[in-house]
Amino acid sequence: MENYSKLSKIILGFVGFAFLFLILQQIIINPLKIGRDFSPDDINWDDPIIYERYIKHKYLINHINNYDSFIIGASAASNIRPENQLGGKWYAYTGAYMNLFETKRFLQEIISKRKIKNLIITISDENLKIDEISSYKEICNVRPGFEYYPLPQSLEEKLFYYSKNFFSLPTLSIIQRKIESLQVQNQDFQPKPISELTQEEIKEMLPVSSLEILPERFEEIKEINDLAKENNINIIFVYIPEYIKVYNVAAKKNIENKIKIAKIVPFYDFSGANEINNNPKNYMDLIHFNDEVGNLVLDRIFNQDKNNPPKIKNFGNYYKLNQSDITK
């Protein structure tokens, strides 16, 4: 019996060591997981799914002196391209479901490495709902295989991240090949027929719509703004355009959110009902507007007087509330 007990301890110790070794192997060889966890029928290391945040982060840190201005936000913001109209050294640090916690953490890191001139911070319904880790798990439960995570930094994040994915380990050569082949600045989205979708169908297609707004996201907006002011960075907050049927999934909540934001920082509001958002031809899918809309956003911000109504009615209203406005 005693020998059996010793053998059990040895086996358990070996299993535990092997588990920790595999996680450590992931952290060393594939620190932010190029690819994602695959089902046995879906393993294809010749063309693994890219973990976009890692690629962009790695590229930017390696080329930090090439950029002094950034647009940061969820993937929809990737079609707002300031360099097209403003020139300068802009980089789009955007990614699927990137939240304001990630934005703040990224900003803190970049500020520690170089002087920043300009920031455009994009806000949307989705990045007010996504938290550091738990909401990502909830989204994955709603839509299996929907694998978008923030950059894991804390011990809790890393343990969750790597323990979930340590069976999907690519080789170093595959990682390097994918890094070299990826165009980090551009994203391509295929048009989808969205005009005939009902509100209920849209709600089902967007897992984030089922989540609640997180109060800490508003605090992070303040912290991001404070960081910019402390470091003499020109910062602009933008509530991005949303296809009207997507916006209407939570229209009342969206209005409440905007009032809360306006109490913290001034911002341009491109969401809601207007001729741009009402037209499905301006959207490549439910979330992503096209380049032309991105250029209209920039035109409103940089070529029009913010204190006057926008040229396109209700597309880019500028909100800056004082106490009397808040009371009203």
Image (cartoon, helix red, strand yellow):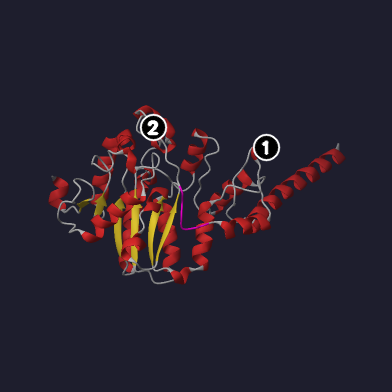
Pinpoint residue 129: horizontal percent, then vertical percent.
39, 43
Q: Nearer the viewer, residue 322 or 205?
A: 205
Q: Nearer the viewer, residue 135 or 119?
A: 119
| Residue type beneath disc 2 | Ile
In this image, 116 relative to 269: left or right? right
Around disc 2, counting alpha carbons within 10 Å, would you say few (fewer than 14), some (14 to 19), or many (20 or more)? Answer: some
Closer to the N terminus: mark 2 or mark 1?
1
Can residue 79 be spotted in the picture?
A: yes
Pinpoint residue 198: horizontal percent, then vertical percent.
35, 28
Provide the residue designation for mark 2.
Answer: 202
Pinpoint residue 291: horizontal percent, then vertical percent.
36, 51
Q: Give me the disc on residue 40.
A: 1
Residue drawn at (42%, 44%) of the image: 130
In this image, 174 relative to 311: left or right? right
In this image, 221 relative to 101: left or right? left
Q: Main secondary structure of the magenta part?
A: loop
For mark 1, give the secondary structure: helix
Magenta stretch encompasses residue 268: no
For residue 175, above or below residue 45:
below
How many numbered discs?
Answer: 2
**Quarter placement of the C terminus:** top left
Do tag 2 and tag 1 residues touch (Cβ < 8 Å)?
no
Pinpoint residue 282: horizontal percent, then vertical percent.
33, 43
Can residue 153 be spotted in the picture?
A: no
**Quarter placement of the N terminus:** top right
For residue 198, above or below residue 9:
above
For mark 2, give the secondary structure: helix
| Residue type beneath disc 1 | Pro
The CA span between labels 2 and 1 is 30 Å
Residue drawn at (40%, 57%) of the image: 104
Which residues make up the magenta segment? 183-188
Q: Give me the disc on residue 20.
A: none
